[in-house]
Amino acid sequence: MEKTWISMGAIFAFLGFIQGLLNTFMPHELSFACKRLGVRIYNAIFSSYVDYAVEEYDGTKLNELYDAAQLHLSDKAARSARRLSLIQPKNASVLTCSLGEHERVVDVYEGSQIWWEFSSSERKQSMTISWQTMPDKRRSLHMRIHRKDREKIMSGYLPSLLENAKALQLKRRDRLLYTNVSHDPRGRRKPWDSVPFKHPATFHSLALEPALKQKIMDDLTDFANGEQFYKDVGRAWKRGYLLYGPPGTGKSTMIAAMANFLEYDVYDLELTEVKSNAELRSLLLNTSNKAIIVLEDIDCSLDLSERKRKKAKKPDAENEEKMLGLAEREEKVSEVTLSGLLNFTDGLWSSCGSERIFVFTTNHIEKLDAALLRSGRMDMHIHLSYCGFEAFKVLARNYLKLEDHVLFEKVRAAMDEEGVQMTPADVSEVMTRDKRDTEQALRSLIKELRESKVKRRDGEQKEEGANEGTEEKQEVVPKEADVQCGVQKENAKVCEDAGNEVDINQEAAQEKIIH
Ligand SMILES: Nc1ncnc2c1ncn2[C@@H]1O[C@H](COP(=O)(O)OP(=O)(O)OP(=O)(O)O)[C@@H](O)[C@H]1O
Ligand SMILES: [Mg+2]
């Protein structure tokens, strides 16, 4: 026994001596190559696993698979790993967990296991000059799978991981509200500027007849799930909604509810800020998919009244030349045309993205050009009107936490009286004022409903009086107001013309119009 130990000791001493010699005299590259060969022979003969490294950077470009894998593994990591990094991604209020050094998680795909491990090492500083500054650490995720699963993982697991990460990213990020009225720090125009979209409106809180509400929600759901349908019928994946009705009936609120329902971004397009059809097109090209593009009060933007008002200002004699240049430029400014807008909503360019919803709002549908109202541009016309009893019940639930009350019947009776017109905005205001005393709130509402009849009658009489006096007034009012009156008159004419066209098409459109 003693002899055996002595001979084993001699063998180890000899091996150690040989290794020392090799380390000293063998070049580093050769020893590295030998080691690699050894690992390869071992893996080929004994190992039944395949290992993949997913590095954070592919050269100097970010590796999308790395981010996707991190997002995909985030929930699993949060549940099973003990050392984690917490990340707050840009534009997201939900944190993402990523694995800490040498932490592992096991993922399962169709019965096959996938082991993921995170590691990092110091990045060797490159001697070449690069514009891109790279992080000090070289981070990577290592994926280990069974050799037999190679095909399944490559063609099934990894694509599904990327899909899942994309869906998670959409779900976790804050949605954005974009506006086209923006400039960069140097004062140059930017196509869109954004802020997080935080409007709390939902279809649940929207005061609307239940049947209409359900119809709109179904339509939106069909649209969002309709990728294949739109492909099959050869149409761009987009849909147009026209919301019309008096001020304060919830048009803007409904847009917010739509965006929250579909989890889309909102692009609020200020048409009076757009200088040309080309700019309009470029704004469209700069919108993302899954977006609602909104044009509010389209009847006011379409005839570009603001620009006409500017142009109508007379130049001083002194600055005539300068103003002439300005006028020329403003001539250019007013180049957004109806046809430009029509192409924006239903031309070739409107199909450059997918899953886009166009929403136009107006208080006066009769002023809109029939071409704008046709299917394919505005597919669904939604009339939002004065507060009815069903809409009132939603508001009572929202503001007063009331499902039912003895005074509800009186409210219904007051609402049914002829000539009573209160918008949901007016009803909300009464309830906000008296929200501490629900009974008082309902009584005030009944009173205001009845008074609204009188107010309306007075308003109509005043309007008639004002219309009668308009022509006389135009001769005496100062310049600025004069311009506005001029514009209104001009608009009225444009709208009259458009109104005739609308009437012609109204019957055809009637079936689509939902009251
Ligand atoms: N249908 C509704 N459901 C719930 N709240 C509503 C509804 N309509 C109006 N409101 C309330 O009234 C306020 C004004 O509504 P909103 O801005 O949506 O009206 P609008 O139709 O867009 O008006 P305008 O034509 O003047 O732009 C909102 O802040 C909201 O609180
Ligand atoms: Mg509005």
Image: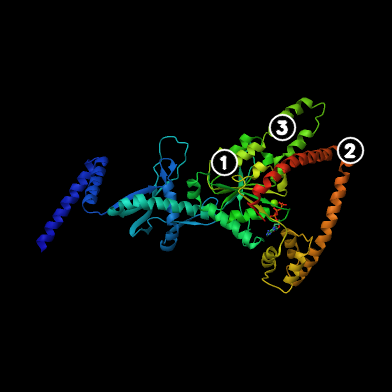
Percent coordinates x, y for residue 355 in the rendering: 54, 48
In-front residue for pair 448/13: 448
Q: Earlier in the sequence, mark 3 or mark 2?
A: 3
Q: Say which quarter of the image contains residue 2.
A: bottom left
Which class describes the residues within 10 Å of circle 3: few (<14), some (14-19), or many (20+)? some
Residue type at the position of mark 2: Glu
Percent coordinates x, y for residue 88 in the rendering: 52, 54
| Looking at the image, residue 162 lies above or below residue 447 | above
Which mark identifies residue 475?
2
Whether ligand 1 has any atom under 8 Å from the Cβ at mark 2 is answered as no
In-front residue for pair 94/85: 94
The CA span between labels 2 and 1 is 46 Å
Circle 3 residue: 330
Q: Earlier in the sequence, mark 2 or mark 1?
A: 1
**Nearer to us: label 3 or label 2:** 2
Circle 1 residue: 350
Q: Does residue 129 appear left or right of residue 198 in this picture?
A: left
